[in-house]
Image (cartoon, helix red, strand yellow):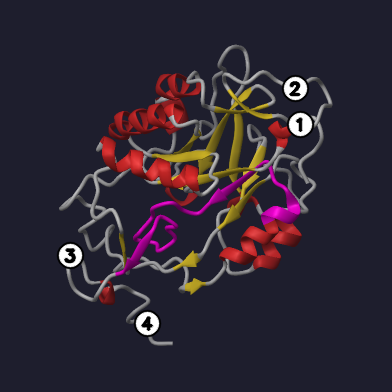
Amino acid sequence: RLAAGVAVTTTATPLPASGERTALTATKYVVHYMPWFLGPGSSHWCNQQWGGSWYESVLGEYDVSDHAAHTRQLQLMRAAGIDGLWFDFQKPSWIPRIQAIAQEALALGLNFAIVADNFSDEHIVNTLREELQTFMQMPNYYRVDGRPVLVLFESPHRWSRRDTVVPTWELDGQRPFVIGTYHWHADEREAIPEGMDSLFFWHSPDLVWQEQQYYRSSRFSVKAGSVYRGWNEAYRDWHHNPPYLGYLSGTLALARENEPAFAQVVTWNDYTEGTMLEPSFLRAPGGCVDPTLSYWHNFSW
């Protein structure tokens, strides 16, 4: 459970008195948000490698930089009781989109943090240090005990070295509060890596793993649990997990019971992996990209 005295705030929120447990420590439900959609014909909507999907958004093939589109998304989040967004961040070209959505989130009373996804650049937290620091100085940026939150979505199979995977810098005299990826550091016999303060859970069909290992881990006190409906990827060549669905009520129950600092909704809008909780519907076979060409659809069980 969330330790007394741990304050999850934003940049503009004053810290509670030492040891005081207030509403600031209630679980923050945050959506993992993909800012890579750029309208009809863009790669993540209509590309067999990246954009096959069994589902289609009720908003159509939107462009996340369109003010009307992302404002409607933010309004849906707020109506659902979401506290904020964790933005997936892989490339400098995504910065203007994230900035625009974060500004509108501020106007609507929603908060955010950055998930530095080093799939494309293993050193992204340092090569884009100034850009990250600019985000962290926004008034609706999440902090833990006054330190700006920096989530690391790790892709170690694509790294050549690890010493600059974590930030080598400070902001206002403090290191960011770094939350790494539990999947890569799940051995409870080992300490979490140097430079990390906590780990987040992504997804798994094994709820016992999340409950009995992740939530009960003694290696870190600030938990970032996961809420998800399941997984139904539509990649043609990649294959991460066989499909599984029907996990929303179970993962919500775990979050309520264990009261993590954050509960990450996995995800708001990853259509290719079929994890989205944005309102959507099943698309008919064919169309822009046919998901029946995906690996698991043609897998021989």
Whichever of callouts 2 and 4 sits on the residue coming sooner in the sequence is 2
Q: Which residues are magenta?
A: 255-282
> In whole angstroms, how far apart are the C-alphas of marks 3 and 2?
51 Å
Give the SS element for disc 1.
loop
Using a 10 Å C-alpha cutoff, classify the residue at mark 2 as few (fewer than 14 neighbours), some (14 to 19) or many (20 or more).
Answer: some
Whichever of callouts 3 and 1 sits on the residue coming sooner in the sequence is 1
Label count reads: 4
Residue 191 higher or lower than 20, as above or below: below
Is 213 one of the magenta-colored residues?
no
Give the SS element for disc 2.
loop
Q: Residue 223: which quarter of the image? A: top right
Which residue is labeled 2 in the image? Answer: 16
Using a 10 Å C-alpha cutoff, classify the residue at mark 3 as few (fewer than 14 neighbours), some (14 to 19) or many (20 or more).
Answer: some
The C terminus: image quadrant: bottom left
Contact, CB < 8 Å: mark 2 with mark 4? no
Q: Residue 99: which quarter of the image? A: top left
Under mark 4, the amino acid is: Phe
